[in-house]
Image (tube, grey):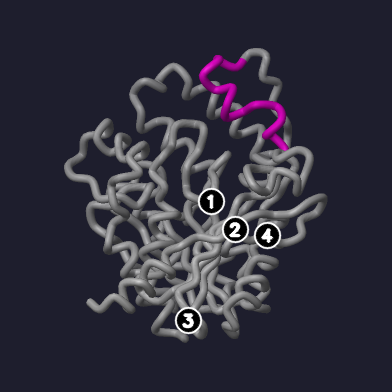
């Protein structure tokens, strides 16, 4: 590889801060430029306080979005990875980060797509949503303006209440929590807030009063229905070692939208790292290892889909 090519690759992988107007203050993100005329993706983060890199003060330090953006740049795809309104570099965008909705996040995704087009000269931008971000991308994709298509990575294809119950039941340590958790989920699914005074302490982070309005909105979403009505190209990427969303979710999305491209990547977990075996502790260890590379199969699935439709 020549020095010129090496320099170009280094520049392509350099993140620069970018911002757009938010409801009360700016929304922040990071842009990696793979070159004029290249496709561009907006990387939408997953649930909770997850930052533009994929990390969270809740103990996640996998940096999967930063690694994805760098690897996409090496494959000729520019990207903007974003901080959600009210959090991190987007903290000033809204006073209370809990006072949001999927529709609000979708509106932000559209605004970022417009900014991505302006930065790159691309005719449209791709939305690459991970976990909860996949739902946001599907919701935003109902309006095709400025958008090329959607890549749903590790997204739910079933109602969130079904997925949450499955996640809680999968951990034997949660046995005593299942009854009160299921009762609380039932109330929220019915659109009613839950009195938390009798909830076991371990369930408080999930059902904290401040997040319940957002949970009610989230539990009412139907990602399969959004996939069904999507008129844009759709790729569905799912790791078969994912402890949070399952291959069944990906297949449900694909069944709803038969034109979609479904890619099940073997050996890949929820933070898009390659893991071996069925040991839960080993799988979760990847959540805190930024030095573990992102699974090449994930990068290939996304880059091939995006670049084939320029």
The kind of secondary structure element at disc 1 is: loop
Q: Is residue 220 magenta?
A: no
Measured in 3D between alpha carbons, the distance from the residue under mark 2 to the one under mark 1, in whole angstroms, is 11 Å
Q: Is residue 206 magenta?
A: yes
Q: Identify the residue shown where x is 49% and y is 38%.
A: 164
Where residue 265 appears, as percent x and y from the top left, is: 28, 60
95 or 178, nearer to the observer:
95
Question: In the picture, residue 281 is in which quadrant?
Answer: top left
Residue matched to label 3: 38
Where residue 28 appears, as percent x and y from the top left, is: 65, 54
In the image, which residues are magenta? 199-213
The kind of secondary structure element at disc 2 is: strand
The N terminus lies in quadrant = bottom left
Q: Is residue 2 above or below residue 279?
A: below
Measured in 3D between alpha carbons, the distance from the residue under mark 4 to the one under mark 1, in whole angstroms, is 12 Å
The kind of secondary structure element at disc 4 is: strand
How many circles with numbers are drawn on the protein?
A: 4
Q: Is residue 109 above or below residue 158?
A: below
Secondary structure that dominates the magenta span: helix
Residue matched to label 2: 17
Residue matched to label 4: 19
**Is there a contact, CB below 8 Å, between mark 2 and mark 4?**
yes
First in residue order: circle 4 vs circle 3: 4
Q: Is residue 229 above or below residue 82?
A: below
Measured in 3D between alpha carbons, the distance from the residue under mark 2 to the one under mark 4, in whole angstroms, is 7 Å
Disc 2 packing (10 Å; few <14; some 14–19; many ≥20): few
Which mark identifies residue 52?
Answer: 1
Measured in 3D between alpha carbons, the distance from the residue under mark 3 to the one under mark 2, in whole angstroms, is 19 Å
């Amino acid at each position: 590889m020549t020095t010129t090519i090496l320099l170009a690759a280094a520049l392509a992988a350099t993140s620069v801060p970018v911002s757009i107007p938010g409801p009360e203050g700016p929304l922040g993100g990071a842009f990696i430029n793979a070159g004029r005329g290249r496709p561009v993706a907006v990387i939408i983060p997953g649930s909770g306080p997850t930052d533009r890199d994929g990390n969270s003060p809740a103990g996640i330090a996998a940096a999967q979005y930063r690694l994805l953006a760098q690897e996409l740049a090496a494959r000729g795809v520019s990207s903007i990875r974003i901080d959600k309104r009210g959090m991190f570099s987007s903290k000033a965008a809204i006073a209370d980060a809990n006072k949001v909705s999927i529709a609000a996040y979708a509106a932000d995704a559209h605004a970022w797509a417009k900014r991505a087009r302006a930065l790159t000269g691309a005719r449209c931008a791709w939305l690459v949503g991970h976990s909860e971000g996949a739902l946001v991308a599907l919701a935003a994709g109902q309006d095709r303006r400025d958008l090329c298509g959607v890549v749903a990575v590790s997204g739910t294809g079933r109602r969130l209440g079904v997925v949450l119950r499955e996640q809680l039941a999968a951990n034997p340590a949660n046995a005593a929590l299942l009854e009160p958790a299921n009762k609380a989920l039932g109330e929220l699914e019915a659109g009613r807030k839950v009195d938390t005074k009798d909830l076991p302490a371990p369930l408080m982070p999930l059902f904290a009063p401040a997040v319940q309005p957002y949970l009610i909105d989230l539990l009412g979403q139907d990602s399969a229905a959004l996939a069904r009505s999507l008129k844009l190209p759709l790729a569905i990427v799912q790791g078969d070692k994912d402890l949070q969303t399952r291959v069944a979710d990906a297949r449900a999305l694909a069944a709803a939208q038969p034109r979609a491209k479904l890619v099940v990547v073997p050996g890949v977990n929820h933070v898009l790292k390659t893991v071996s075996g069925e040991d839960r502790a080993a799988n979760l260890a990847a959540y805190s290892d930024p030095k573990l590379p992102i699974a090449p199969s994930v990068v290939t699935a996304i880059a091939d889909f995006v670049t084939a439709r320029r």
